[in-house]
Image (cartoon, grey):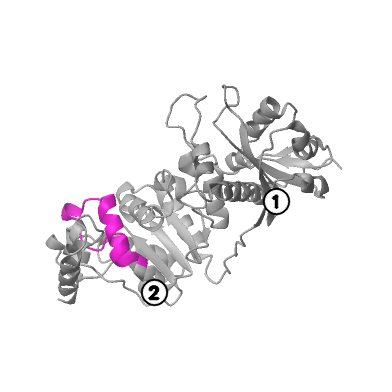
Amino acid sequence: MKGFFEIKHKRTESSRKEKNSLSCTSCGLFKDALTPMIQPYGNFNKRILILGEAPGSTEDERGKPWQGKTGRLLKRTCSKLGIDLFEDCVSINAVNCRPSGNKTPTKQQIVCCWKVMVEKAIKEYAPDIIILLGGPALISFLDNRWKKNLGGITRWRGWTIPDQDYRAWVCPTFPLSYVERMQNEAVDDIWESDLQQAFSKIGEKLPVFIPPKIDIIEDLSPLNDIDADMIAFDYETTGIKPHGKGHRIVSCAVADKEDHAYSFLLPKTREERLPLINLLQNNTIAKIAQNMKFEDHWTERRLYTSVHNWGFDPMLSSHILDNREGVCGLKFQAYVNFGVVGYDNEISPYLQSGDKNANAINKIHELLKKPGGKEKLLTYGGYDAVLARLLAKLHMNKIDYDFLPF
């Protein structure tokens, strides 16, 4: 009965707030649940948190996760891999009241339960490993930080993500309901492999991403003193293509080290731009860019020069290493490899035009007019350049690639 009184309190509390507040009342699933707000369950001996989709009828009756057919499948597979589901893990669901008819929970219900229960449980337990079983679990954990299109679980499964915000390995995989329903050997093998990969992180120290130093400069003369075998550079522009009237390169960032970048608004005169032009023409320094054809086209069209000694494009290597749809973008790769998420959330809307015309002008100038807008844009560009450099180095090691001609 404790769960009922907790719900009643939250319902009364939310009625005093705005009508659309995120609460159990705005979700409403508790009204038909035998056991509302099923609590996290498990002894957590190996510091693993499993986030599922929603309780089924058996879980609703017994008031605990993983009590039905899919739960037995999970317990059996964990045991095969040397993990006791209820002793070594703690389990909670994206939605913790049973949806009527065992329906897939809606995004609204998931977001409500995140605010009421799930986020608190993750912070309280502070797990070393978080396993996300299915789309609702993915939405629950990531939607509040990932402001772009999440895509489906197929895009995310199999990664072991060193999430910097929660200091945990995040391991998405298929939902149990899908694995049980498919009864397919290939699906079973993939799912078991994903779990095995997640469990392999037990005891492995999470790498720490140290925010890079971004030097915002106006005079480009520091570029003359760069002493590096390779640099990554990144443009922020007025649109996708450089050919239309009014288009220009607004800013540039140059990462000369793994933890440092110079970032600047592009000067108006060629004389002021010469340190950048000379750097791009330097044959002894290899150049890196995420989707290098973008920077290459803009350089030729708007700086009236070519980039010498292109070295590596981490977007292409991302596709070589994993050819699933939607995994090659820098923001996705930055999260799954380094655990960095959301640094673009404030800037991204200004880099969109809202027009399907490829030559349309975006809203970047609106950002520059806002207080602090210049600094935010240049910091964002610096992060892009540093992360592209880090990603390139990581991928070079994976594919044993050496581009240096000397």
Q: Residues within 10 Å of mark 2 (few under 14, many from 20)?
A: few
Classify residue 210 by image quadrant: bottom right
Pick out the residue farthest to the right. Answer: 406
For residue 262, side relative to residue 320 (left or right): right
Comparing 232 with 45, the one in front is 232
Q: Tell me, yes or no, if residue 105 can be seen here.
A: no
Q: Residue at x 14, y 76 (%)?
A: 1
For residue 223, side relative to residue 314 (left or right): right
Q: CA distance from mark 1 to mark 2?
A: 37 Å
Q: Residue at x 64, y 57 (%)?
A: 212
Q: Residues within 10 Å of mark 1 (few under 14, many from 20)?
A: few
Q: Residue at x 17, y 66 (%)?
A: 11
Q: Amino acid at mark 1?
A: Asn
Our reading of the magenta stretch's main secondary structure is: helix
221 over 121 or under it: above or below: above
User: Disc 1, disc 2: CB below 8 Å?
Assistant: no
Segment tinted magenta in the rendering: 94-119
82 over 149 or under it: above or below: below
Q: Any mark on residue 124, and which? A: 2
For residue 9, side relative to residue 373 (left or right): left
Question: Where residue 307 appears, x then y in whole percent?
Answer: 75, 32
Q: What residue is disc 1 on?
A: 397
183 over 126 or under it: above or below: above
What is the quadrant of the C terminus in the image?
top right
Q: Tell me, yes or no, if residue 99 can be seen here.
A: yes
Q: Amino acid at mark 2?
A: Glu
For residue 312, side relative to residue 146 (left or right): right
